[in-house]
Amino acid sequence: MNVAVALLISGLVVLFVGQNPLEAVGYLVSGSLGSGEGIGFTLYFATSFMFTGLAVAVASHAGLFTIGAEGQAYLGGLGIALVCLALDKVVPWYVTLVPAAMAGMLFGAAWAFIPAYLQARRGSHLVITTIMFNFIASSVMIYVLVNLIKESGSMAPQTRLFDAGGLVPKLGEILPVDIGTAPLNISLFIAIAAAVFVWVLIWKTKLGFEIRATGANPAAARNAGIGYVKITIVCMLISGALAGLAGVNILMGDLGKLQLDFPAGIGLVGVAVALMGRGHPVGIAVASVLFGVLYQGGAEISFWMPNITRELIMLIQGLVILFAGALSLMFRSSVYSLVDLFRFSKREA
Amino acid sequence: MQEFLTTVILLLSSTLRLSVPLVLCGLAGLFSERSGVWDIGLEGKMLFAAFAAAAAAYQFDSAWVGLVFAILVAVLLSLIHGFASVTHQGNQIISGVAINFISSGLTVLLAVGWFALGGRTPQLQPEARFPTVILPFAEEMRPVPVLGAIYADLISGYNILVYIAFAAVPVTWWVFHHTRFGLRLRAVGENPAAVDTAGISVDWLRYRALLCGAILCGIAGAYLSIAQSAGFVREMSAGKGYMALAALIFAKWRPVPVLFACLLFGFLEALSIRFQAFDFGLGPALSTQIVQSLPYVLTVVLLAGFMGRAIPPKAGGIPYTKER
């Protein structure tokens, strides 16, 4: 319902800039779901969004609204790239994968730690500090890429290409599916495992109970002996680690190198995905696929209709956040009153 | 001596120029947050207003029309924010973040759709921008030592929006402390139930506070695109809205300290532009990155409360529900 309204308004905007929205929808659907390759790209994007969506969701269960997944994914990518550069010529990919993923999680968590600490101990506004940390991350990464790990002899701020030992297999290579050149890779399974992990963590463990208690009522949780500082920091560390994992999908699964601005907004999509999925892993999986469709379809649209840019996706995200997050109560009450009306008229009859 | 004075004056006058959007947004945030509505959407409102100003100024060849459109757009976005977070009691932070997303997407989308220049608006002609105001006797004063240079180069010679921004500070102070509206506005941010009991509509008061903020945000946006520069560029607000919020917290939600906090941020930005490759003895490359991220780092440091604890308005962030 909320998503439908968001899409409807986006359609109006397309109309407003003088383009045919139906044509746009056509490209959107056929580009993202119309071919094996399209589906491959859609699921590839969805994999990244799963990680960042889960990252935002874990924090939100403790009542923390984080926008830092972008910077955490970026820094996580640095950790992954360092491991890949060190090991890719020595050992095969399945040996590299574990330490690389660990490094990604470690770097992502480390980047989340300072805002978490400041929120827990000093009451700094988490939303603002995480946004600032996204800006700072981009400065840090420019410096690191340009001055420390740039491929020698190349002008572009990026590392050298990873060797086979730093690349995870694409699904088209190991499974009998035809996804063309789509970079969908085994990270999809890691993302699914991460979703299961989050589900178990939040709903099946003591820590998860404490997280939810803190999110529901921090004061009551504190009185029940749950440490606010501990929960805040632990949640943000898990969140940062999940965001950091996204780099496995993008760097080891597709790019094969670390380059400037590689997260390209996935952390921000994560905010929308988490809100749309209501913080539940299943909902997040569904929302990720939907945003995968939008991303891949959006790329198709901007290819065929040059007056529409990929920022259309940004707009749709904003509308989804508005309707699914801030205005979620609006529809609920109007649906209720509809139901009431229906009941009332039945009773009359 | 003369050279030193010139450098200082240049630095200070660029500090003033760079603080303008921060001051306007900071005051805008002050209005809405003192009334109990968090406003993370300042950034988005300013960005969209900047686009509206540039587009309208280009279309009608008039800076004033641009300003009007900028304010209208900011008001519209504020109404959305109010609709979601006051009327429907949604989460104010989420609603503000949504406004930021919508603005950064829609501005580029519309810019490309209408002007097809890769997300910018066409270069504006001088008549579509705000001209520089030369205060009376600026040239005549110039020969006077020290004072003349200060008057001619530091006080005179900005566009009208700069003067509006700095005039807005005492006006805001006066509104907050010497009008019935200001008193009620502060009250509704601390104890909305009391205001409600007194028979004053909490929602309407908060809407009015948001509208005051929207007007200031609109001016800030217009300043970015049609006074400071000659057109809209994508993401031209570059985190200024968030920094204004940080300044607001740093200033403990009081108008005059907001001015000084914003001037501090403006000064840092001026420094970082002036000393782009300032050498900290760590190599030029590292220094550039440090200087560029300095405002962001400083924001985090200030927010960490090293300047004493800031206590926000008590009812901030909590939608008001009338007792039933």
Image (cartoon, coloured by chain):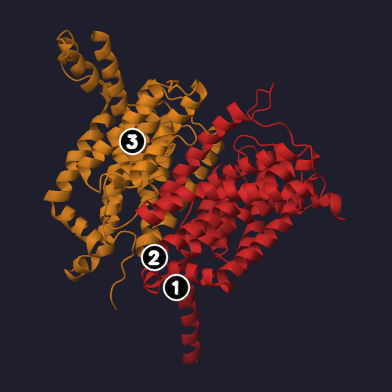
Chain colours: A red, B orange
Instruction: Count how many numbered circles sit on residues in the image.
Output: 3
Relative placement, left or right, of A293 versus A210 is right
Amino acid type shown at disc 3: Pro
In the rendering, at what x and y percent does residue A70 appear?
55, 46
Residue in front for this viewpoint, B200 or B314: B314
Q: Does residue A338 lie above or below A165 as drawn?
A: below
- Rounded to the nearest angstrom, the CA distance separating label 3 from label 2 is 30 Å
Mark 1 and 3 residues: CB-CB less than 8 Å, in contact?
Answer: no
Q: Nearer the viewer, mark 1 or mark 3?
A: 3
Q: Which mark is residue A333?
A: 1
Q: Which mark is residue B21?
A: 3
Give the structural element (helix, strand or loop) at label 2: loop
Residue on which the image places disc 2: B88
Amino acid type shown at disc 2: His
Q: Is residue A84 visible?
A: yes
Relative placement, left or right, of A97 versus B192 is right
Mark 1 vs mark 2: tell me if same chain: no
Mark 1 closeness class: few <14, some 14–19, many ≥20 residues within 10 Å = few
Q: Which mark is residue A113?
A: none
Q: Quadrant of residue A194?
A: bottom right
Mark 1 and 2 residues: CB-CB less than 8 Å, in contact?
Answer: yes
Going 76% across and 43% down the picture, which residue do you hit? Answer: A167
